[in-house]
Amino acid sequence: MTRTDPVVAQRQVGLAQGLEQRTAAQAALASGVISAEHAAVIVAADRQLPTGVTASQREVVEQSLVEKAQELSPAMLRRAARRALEAVEPDVSVVDAHENELVVNEEDRARSKTRLTLHENGDGTVTGHFTVPSAQGMLLKKIIDTITAPRRGRLGAAQAQVGERECRTDWDRARGEALVELIEHLPVDHLHPRSAATVVITLSEDVLRGALRAAGLDTGEMLSAGEVRRLACTAHLIPVVLNGKGNPVDLGRSARLFSEAQRVALGLVHQTCAADGCDRPYAWCELHHLHEWALGGRTDLANAVPLCHFHHQRIHDHRYQHTRTRSGSILFTRRT
């Protein structure tokens, strides 16, 4: 009984059948000068050649790809194989058109495979799985890599301030946190209706003013008091404040949020997050009320400070206290 994965076994059978009429690739694979992945690319490239290509021309194309396979990785060979026709076609425009047709077909197949699934785990998390076209996938990877790039302030300085080594070397977790940060910064202004992309939260006045009690979202989930106050600084959450009798006493965001003009003006003063030593770009920062809006703080420039996602969470974490230095930066220390 074989323990080979059915998908792998099917792929191996397909490769063996594809190599039957491709002697150059078959010999190269048998001698070990190319890998099975290389051979699969060569077989696929031959199948994608225009119908007008003769048998002798196909042999020339195959030999050309075998030679390239000995120098290129499978991924690089796959890209080169899109222009395999140039081995027998002198007209560059014909080669270009064929390559473009292959790319269009690849894009169509990629779009047809695009999927996203989300599953609530019942423990405060959601697990997701997605498949997207390579271009968008690589774009997402670049964005995540940029967000998770080591930064002396966001990680090191924060650790030095609190006098402890926080576990932030787990890159799976770091990428997950980067995705959370990305989601919270996605623009939703163009969505219709906009309210569909905005979370409504109900909370009592004392929670907004500093009480340590969880609050409920309109999705049925719960958030901690600190996370509620942090998100209340952004445009992605509308707080419905209830009085002691459970009646709404405030709903809205106009007086709560800093205007775009204020954000631009503050950007002339701050180039990065205001946390001491943090170099997270200002464009990715959230504006925080130094004197909290819920406690009567005004929504004006004198009361505004830009904080990155990490430090905005920290400033609303009751386990830490913060002070403003003479330079205007924010210094965090752990409460004892």
Image: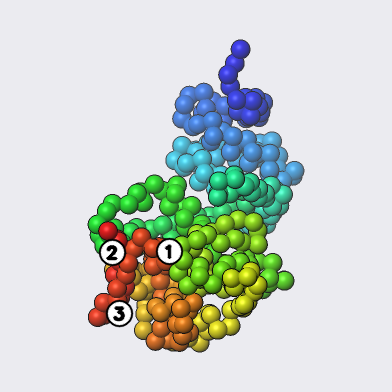
Q: Work out whether 235 lies above or below 131.
A: below
Residue hosting label 1:
313
Using the image as rendered, state which of residue 38 and residue 106 is in the foreground.
106
Visible residue check, residue 51: yes
Residue hosting label 3:
328
Disc tally is: 3
Secondary element at tag 1: helix
Q: Residue at x 43, y 60 (%)?
A: 147
Task: Give how far apart the Cα atoms at labels 1 and 3 are.
Answer: 19 Å
Q: Earlier in the sequence, mark 2 or mark 3?
A: 3
Report the side of 166 relative to 133 (left or right): left
Secondary element at tag 3: loop
Q: Residue at x 49, y 32 (%)?
A: 34
- List the single residue furthest toward the front: 245
Q: Residues within 10 Å of mark 1 (few under 14, many from 20)?
A: some
Residue hosting label 2:
333
Q: Which disc, if any, is residue 303?
A: none
Q: Residue at x 43, y 52 (%)?
A: 174
Q: Quadrant of residue 289?
A: bottom left
Q: Earlier in the sequence, mark 1 or mark 3?
A: 1
Report the side of 100 relative to 301 (left or right): right
Report the side of 30 relative to 116 (left or right): left
Q: Residues within 10 Å of mark 3 (few under 14, many from 20)?
A: few
Q: Residues within 10 Å of mark 2 (few under 14, many from 20)?
A: some
Using the image as rendered, state which of residue 328 and residue 174 is in the foreground.
328
Q: How is the image coloured?
A: rainbow
